[in-house]
Image (spheres, rainbow, N blue to C red):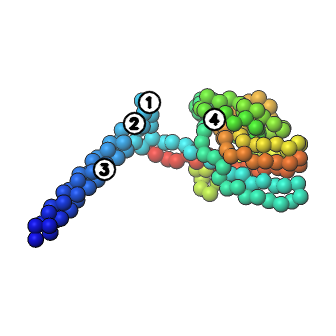
C-alpha cells in the first residue's frame, strides 16, 4: 500500500514537472515569434524573400541526374540595394537578372558577396518565367563544362560579365566531366505580408 502511494506521488511530481517544462517552452516560443529575430532583424509580419536553387546534371552521353534543391538563400545586399534603386528608376533594368554562372569556390555564402569565389565557364543567359505562383521569379539556365570540374557554387547575375550578383549558392560538390552540363533552376519567392 505504501509503495503504491509513493509511486502515485512520484508520477504526480513527474507529470507536474513535465507540464511546467511544456508551459515554459511555450512561453519562450511565443516570445521568439513576437519579437525581432535579432537587432535590426525582421519584425513579425515582415516580408522576407526566400530563394532556392535546383540542379539537374546533363551528362555528355545524354544521361540526366535530377539533384532537386541543392541550396536555399543567400540573396545579396547588392541585389536588395539594386532592387530599391530600380523601384525609384524610370528606366529599370531589373529584368536582366538571368545570367547563370558556376564555380569551384567553396567559401561560405554571405550577403556581402558580389561575385563567385572561383568562377569557371562562360555565363549562360537563362530563360525567365513565373514560377508555380505569381509571386515566384524563376530563371533556368544550363552551363556546360569545358574541362573536368568540381562545381560547388552558383550565382545569378544581371550581365554576361561583371554586373550585379543577385544570389550566390554553395552546395555539395557536383562533379562534371568535359561536356557535362548543369541545368540550374533559380527561384525567388517574394511573399506578401505586413
Q: CA distance from mark 4 to mark 2?
A: 25 Å
The answer to which of 56 and 41 lies nearer the viewer is 56
Between the residue at mark 2 and the residue at mark 3, the CA separation in whole angstroms equals 17 Å
Q: Earlier in the sequence, mark 2 or mark 3?
A: 3
Q: Are marks 1 and 3 in contact (CB under 8 Å)?
A: no
Nearest the eye: 167 or 180: 180
**Label disc, if present, on residue 108 of the rendered structure:** 4
N-terminal of the two: label 1 or label 4? 1
Q: In this figure, which residue is indicated by the disc labeled 2? A: 36
Query: Which residue appears at 73% of the width and 35% of the height?
Result: 105
The residue singled out by tag 1 in the image is 40
The C terminus lies in which quarter of the figure? Answer: top left
Residue 185: give x, y in percent of width and height. Answer: 71, 50
Instruction: Assign a secondary structure to mark 1.
Output: loop
Tag in front: 1 or 4: 4
- Going from N to C along the chain, the mark reached first, 1 or 3, is 3
Q: Which circle's residue, 4 or 3, is located before the other in the chain?
A: 3
Count how many numbered circles sit on residues in the image: 4
Amino acid at each position: 500500500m505504501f509503495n503504491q502511494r509513493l509511486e502515485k506521488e512520484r508520477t504526480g511530481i513527474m507529470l507536474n514537472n513535465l507540464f511546467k517544462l511544456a508551459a515554459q517552452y511555450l512561453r519562450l516560443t511565443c516570445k521568439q515569434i513576437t519579437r525581432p529575430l535579432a537587432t535590426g532583424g525582421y519584425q513579425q509580419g515582415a516580408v522576407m524573400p526566400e530563394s532556392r536553387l535546383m540542379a539537374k546534371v546533363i551528362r555528355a552521353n545524354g544521361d540526366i541526374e535530377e539533384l532537386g534543391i541543392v541550396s536555399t538563400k543567400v540573396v545579396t545586399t547588392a541585389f536588395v540595394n539594386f532592387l530599391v534603386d530600380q523601384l525609384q528608376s524610370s528606366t529599370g533594368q531589373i529584368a536582366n537578372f538571368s545570367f547563370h554562372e558556376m564555380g569551384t569556390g567553396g567559401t561560405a555564402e554571405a550577403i556581402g558577396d558580389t561575385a563567385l569565389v572561383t568562377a569557371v565557364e562562360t555565363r549562360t543567359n537563362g530563360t525567365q518565367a513565373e514560377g508555380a505562383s505569381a509571386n515566384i521569379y524563376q530563371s533556368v539556365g544550363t552551363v556546360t563544362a569545358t574541362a573536368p570540374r568540381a562545381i560547388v557554387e552558383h550565382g545569378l547575375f544581371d550581365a554576361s560579365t561583371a554586373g550585379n550578383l543577385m544570389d550566390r549558392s554553395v552546395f555539395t560538390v557536383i562533379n562534371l566531366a568535359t561536356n557535362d552540363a548543369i541545368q540550374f533552376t533559380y527561384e525567388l519567392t517574394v511573399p506578401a505580408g505586413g
